[in-house]
Image (cartoon, grey):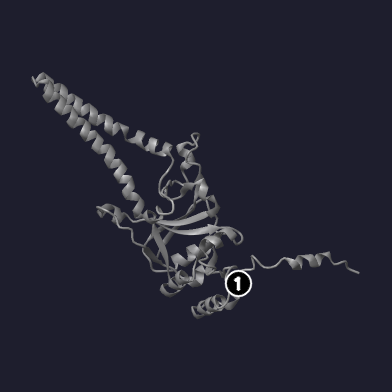
Amino acid sequence: MAKVLLNKSLSKDDILWRYLSLDKLIHMLDTRSIFFTSLGIYANSDPYEGYVPRVVFETLASACSPVINDMDAYFENKIQNQNTNGLNYDELEEFRKLKDNKINDVRASLKDLYKKIIPCMFVNCWHRNNSESEAMWKLYSDQGKGVAIKTTARSLIRALEDCDESINLTLGAVKYLDFSDKNISASDCIIDGHFAPLLKRSSFSHENEVRLFNLRKEDFQNQNQIIPEPLLVRVNPSFLIEDIYISPYSVEPFIYSTSAICKKYGVAESNIHKSTLLNSCEDLLESLIIKA
């Protein structure tokens, strides 16, 4: 079965929402699976996806410095030995260029290594909120045709662990930081022992995002150039779906069609709701009526 690690940034009782189009909901119900996207794809909407503030890269570079220093000392020792063996100036300079190129290759390989990790990281995204989000409806309701799955972290974990799926997943809340803040420390960027993919710029904080994620090590170990492809993980919709909400911007026949499709796939009618987020508030004025 799937194994899901719940990070300390979340509680099992946290309410989660997944806003999506109707076709994606049908795909989930029909295949009984949820869709994980490579972080490499998200670069189209946020070029900083998978990246971290400069201070983290500087810390990682410091950790690698002993390797660079040892390499530099090794080559310098070789140069000194060659010098005593009577090599001329031009030959020694060529040797130094070789040394510099080797060290630069190591530095370049570190950058390349990090870039290769990003597309090997797959995420399934949720929105944490006790109530509906008007902003999320606008983002994910294509011309008013959107739905939202309401669940909890507990139900999501149960739905995944109920299936015969051999995969390790982590569920954690995204932390939002101002990457340009010079007062950020490396420790500020750690979320339950992770950097990516649980770190995003504060400009995206309205998403209040929670992520399921998995690092596909087999891709990372065998790749030359990763072509990000979706990852499907089996899930039990009966445990996952507590309620389904239909966009407040939707009209008929979308509302009827969505309800009919959900019922066809076993979602109880009592768990299907047309959002009342934008309904009239006139009924509140009833409280002004003076009682005899």
* Quadrant location, the N terminus: bottom left
In front of the other: 112 or 146: 146
In the rendered view, tell whether residue 201 sits above or below residue 269. above
Question: Residue farthest to the right?
Answer: 292
Q: Is residue 285 left or right of residue 70?
A: right
- Between residue 14 and residue 30, name the one nearer to us: 30
Is residue 264 something one can see in this rendering?
yes
Q: How many marks?
A: 1
Q: Residue at x 8, y 19 (%)?
A: 86
The C terminus - image quarter: bottom right
Q: Residue at left 51%, top 50%?
A: 204
With respect to residue 227, does 276 lie above or below? below
> What residue is shown at x 55% (from left), y 61% (from top)?
138
Q: Looking at the image, can residue 14 be seen?
A: no
What amino acid is labelled 1 in the image?
A: Lys
Residue 20: % across, % down? 49, 66
Q: Position of residue 157 (x, y in %)?
A: 48, 62
Residue 172 to residue 59: above or below: below
10 Å neighbourhood of mark 1: few (<14), some, or many (≥20)? some
Can you give x and y, in whole percent of width and height, for residue 257 in the image?
53, 78
Q: Which of these two is toward me, 135 or 101?
A: 135
Residue at the far left: name it. Answer: 86
Decide if residue 93 is on the left or right side of residue 259: left
Could you say whether the residue bearing mark 1 is in a helix, strand or loop? strand
- Would you say 116 lies left or right of 187 here? left
Percent position of residue 60, x then y: 37, 38
User: Which residue is more in the foreground, 5 or 213?
Assistant: 213
Q: With respect to residue 30, does 233 lie above or below?
A: above
The residue wearing badge 1 is 274
